[in-house]
Image (cartoon, rainbow, N blue to C red):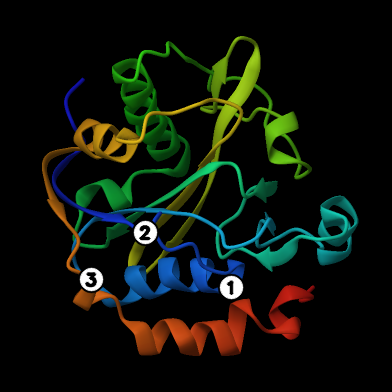
Amino acid sequence: MVPLLKRLLLHDERATPRGAAWNMAVDEALLTGLTEAVLRVYRWERPAFSFGYFLPWREAAAAAGEGRSLVRRWTGGGMVAHGEDFTWSLILPSNEPESRRRPAESYGLLHAALAEAFRRAGAEVEKVKTTARAPAGGLCFTAPAPGDLMLGGRKVAGAGQRRCRHGLLHQGSVSGVTLPGDFPVMLAHALAEEVQTFPPEQLPGEVVRRLVHERYGNEAWLQKR
């Protein structure tokens, strides 16, 4: 498979798990503040539950149950339980041609790269056909969508996307499968010809903190209609 990107920065944050609001804020801050493609891999400091931008928060709160941090994503898609999953985001600025593909095509190509990373890790996954019927919300890993990845008859990978004038944000989750510790490197090289480490000093910390306060950690954003 030919990589989609020429160059990619790998930002592996797994050593420092963060809160749900912070994790979502970092993705938006990177998209709106950088001009380079970034693959971000991260963990959660406590069990969390994210839900797509267009879903009603009451439905998400009922599904999440007790003991999980609830957060509304900037991307679309369904509801996802986090904590044991492999969570990744691909940030593509507007100067990157791949950011301008149509949603279904982009989703399929990015999951094809993810499938290639699975293959390199020794797992042969299957992609849900693009002609399959898309689910209307609900729990993400119980309802495969076109382009999602399946292993042994179970959905193991799904994602949501957001497009804006700054580019494309693709937020993905892999669940129910054991991955090697260097899987982020495998995924990065499946996506890009050249991979470099993300310089930590490029993280726009002040913007992240503002987004946590004004958006992702704010009840008005969480419960918006």
Horizontal side, residue 18 vs residue 34: left or right: right
Task: Indicate the position of residue 41 as horizontal and vertical percent values.
Answer: 39, 51
Where residue 119 sits, quadrant-wise, is top left
Look at the numbered discs 1 and 2 and tell me whether their residues touch, using CB distance below 8 Å.
no
Task: Indicate the position of residue 166 as horizontal and vertical percent values.
Answer: 33, 69
| Residue that carries the numbered disc 2 in the rendered image | 13
Residue found at x 18% / y 62%: 36
Residue found at x 72% / y 30%: 143
Q: Which dot marks residue 200?
A: 3
Question: Which numbered mark, 1 or 2, is in the foreground of this view?
Answer: 2
Question: Which numbered mark, 1 or 3, is in the foreground of this view?
Answer: 3
Q: Secondary structure at mark 2?
A: loop
Q: Is residue 207 above or below residue 67?
A: below
Label 1, residues with CA under 10 Å away: few <14, some 14-19, many ≥20: many
1 or 2: tag closer to the N-terminus: 2
* Residue at the limit of the structure toward the front, as seen here: 15
2 or 3: tag closer to the N-terminus: 2
Q: CA distance from mark 1 to mark 2?
A: 15 Å
